[in-house]
Image (cartoon, rainbow, N blue to C red):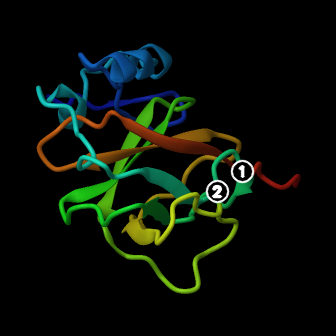
Amino acid sequence: MTNDNTNRAGRRCVAIGASATLAAAIAVVVSGCNASPPAEFSLPTPCTIPAGTQTSLIYPAPNTIGVPGNFGLIVLGSSNALPPDFRAYVVDATASVAQTYGLVAPAPSPLPTPNAPSTFPNTVYQASANASVTWPAGHTLTVFVDATNCAPTQLVGSFTIATAPPH
C-alpha cells in the first residue's frame, strides 16, 4: 500500500517500511512523512539477486559527492546479467522519498562519469533510467537493486547530490 504526503517544501513524500531487516532499518531513517510503505517494500518476498551473481553500483560512483540532481541514469555492474525485470530503486532519506527507475537495459558506452571500476571479471553493465526526476541539492541517495513483484533489499551504494551554487 502506498500513501503519499507532501512535506513543507511541497515535495511528494513516500515513507519506507518493510519486514526485512535491511528495509526496516531504512524505514527508521526515512519515516519523516508519516506515510504508509510504498508497494515495493510491502511485498512479502524480498528481491534476491540470482545465485552466484555479484552486483555493485558503477554510476554514479559510490560515495561520490557532487552528482548533478538530474543524473537520470543508474549503472549497475554485475558478474552475470540481471534478469530483465530488475531495476534500480533510489531512496532519499533526507526528503523521505523513494523512486523506482526503469527496467535494466544495456548501459551506454562509454559509461557516464564519475563511475567506479568494477571488481568483477567480465562485468555486465546494465542501466536503469528515470529522466523525469531531479533530486534536491545536498541530499544523499541510496541505491537498491529491485525487481517487479518483490521488496528491494539489495543495497548497492550511495552518493550525494551537488549543493546548489551560491546566488
- At label 2, the amino acid type is Ala
Quadrant of the image occupied by residue 61 = bottom right
Q: Nearer the viewer, residue 130 or 76?
A: 76
Q: Residue furthest bottom?
A: 109
Q: Nearer the viewer, residue 146 or 100?
A: 146
Residue 89: x and y, percent?
37, 47
Quadrant of the image occupied by residue 21 = top left
- Crowding around mark 1 (Cα neighbors within 10 Å: few <14, some 14 to 19, many 20+) is some
The reply to whether the C-beta atoms of the residues labelled 1 and 2 are less than 8 Å apart is yes
Q: Residue at x 30, y 20 (%)?
A: 17
Q: Is residue 20 left or right of residue 56?
A: left
Q: Residue at x 35, y 47 (%)?
A: 145
| Label 1: element kind | loop
Residue at image mark 1: 64
Q: Residue at x 55, y 51 (%)?
A: 135
- At label 1, the amino acid type is Thr
Q: Residue at x 28, y 32 (%)?
A: 4
Task: Quarter of the image for the C terminus: give it.
Answer: bottom right
- Crowding around mark 2 (Cα neighbors within 10 Å: few <14, some 14 to 19, many 20+) is many
Q: Is residue 70 left or right of residue 21?
A: right
Residue 73: x and y, percent?
48, 66
